[in-house]
Image (cartoon, rainbow, N blue to C red):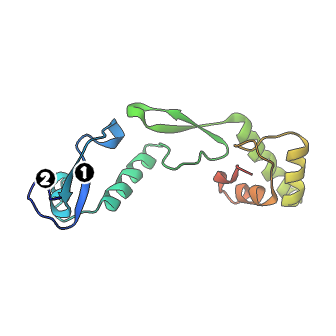
C-alpha cells in the first residue's frame, strides 16, 4: 500500500473520505504528513491524535463519547447521528438518595442492601454492590452497572 496523495509507503493511516461522524465508511490510505495536511495541520498527525480531538469536540457539545451510559443519564440521538445525554429523573433521585444516606452515616454496604431490598435497578438491572455505591458517591456515575 502507498499514500493516496504522495505515494509514500511510510507511516500510512486510514483517512475517512466522509467523516465517520457523518456516516462515512470509505477510507483512503494517507501518510501522516498528507493526513495532517487534509486536516489543516502543518505537521504530521496520527489517527490517535485526530480521535482525541474529535472526542474532545463531542464532549464539548455534550455528546456521549464512551461505551457506557453513566448512571443518572440516558443516551439520546442528536444531530448527525451523534449520541447526547439527558438526565434520567429516577436515577438522579436515586443518586440523591445515596448521597443523603451516606451523609446520614450509612455504610456503602448498607446503602447497596437497601437499594436491592427496595427493588431499585442499576443501569443494567444487576444487583447493587458496595463498590457501585462508593463509585457513585465519588462522582463516578459509570458505576451504575452493579
**Residue 113, label in figure:** none
Specify the label residue 15 is tagged with: 1
Q: Please tell me whether mark 2 or mark 1 is closer to you in this view.
A: 2
Identify whether 80 is placed above or below 116.
Answer: above
Q: Quadrant of residue 143?
A: bottom right
Q: The N terminus appears in which quarter of the rendering?
A: bottom left
Q: Seen in the image, is 144 located left or right of residue 59?
A: right
* Residue 71 pos. (x, y %): 67, 46
Give the image location of residue 23, x and y in percent: 34, 36
Asked if labels 1 and 2 touch by Cβ distance under 8 angstroms, the answer is: yes
Q: Return the residue found at the far bottom.
A: 10
Q: How crowded is mark 2: few (under 14 residues within 10 Å), some or many (20 or more)?
A: some
In the image, is 27 to the left or to the right of 101?
left
- The CA span between labels 2 and 1 is 10 Å
Instruction: Identify residue for label 2.
Output: 4
Q: Position of residue 48 (x, y in %)?
A: 35, 61
Looking at the rendered structure, the secondary structure element under dot 2 is: loop
Up-down: is 85 above or below 4? above
Q: Give residue 105's quadrant in the image.
A: bottom right
Q: Which residue is drawn at 87% across and 61% down?
A: 107
The residue nearer to you, when weighing 106 against 78, is 78
Circle 1 packing at 10 Å, graded few (<14), some (14-19), many (20+), is many
Label 1 sits on a secondary structure element that is strand
Residue found at the very far left of the displayed protein: 6
Amino acid at each position: 500500500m502507498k499514500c493516496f496523495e504522495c505515494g509514500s509507503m511510510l507511516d500510512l493511516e486510514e483517512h475517512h473520505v466522509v467523516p465517520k461522524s457523518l456516516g462515512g465508511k470509505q477510507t483512503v490510505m494517507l501518510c501522516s504528513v498528507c493526513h495532517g495536511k487534509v486536516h489543516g495541520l502543518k505537521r504530521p498527525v496520527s489517527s490517535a491524535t485526530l480521535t482525541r480531538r474529535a472526542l474532545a469536540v463531542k464532549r464539548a457539545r455534550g455528546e456521549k463519547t464512551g461505551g457506557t451510559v453513566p448512571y443518572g443519564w440516558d443516551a439520546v440521538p442528536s444531530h448527525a447521528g451523534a449520541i447526547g445525554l439527558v438526565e434520567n429523573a429516577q436515577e438522579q433521585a436515586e443518586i440523591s438518595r445515596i448521597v443523603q444516606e451516606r451523609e446520614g452515616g450509612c455504610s456503602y454496604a448498607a446503602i447497596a442492601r437497601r437499594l436491592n431490598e427496595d427493588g431499585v435497578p442499576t443501569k443494567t438491572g444487576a444487583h447493587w454492590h458496595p463498590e457501585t455505591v462508593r463509585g457513585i458517591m465519588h462522582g463516578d456515575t459509570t458505576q451504575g452497572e452493579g
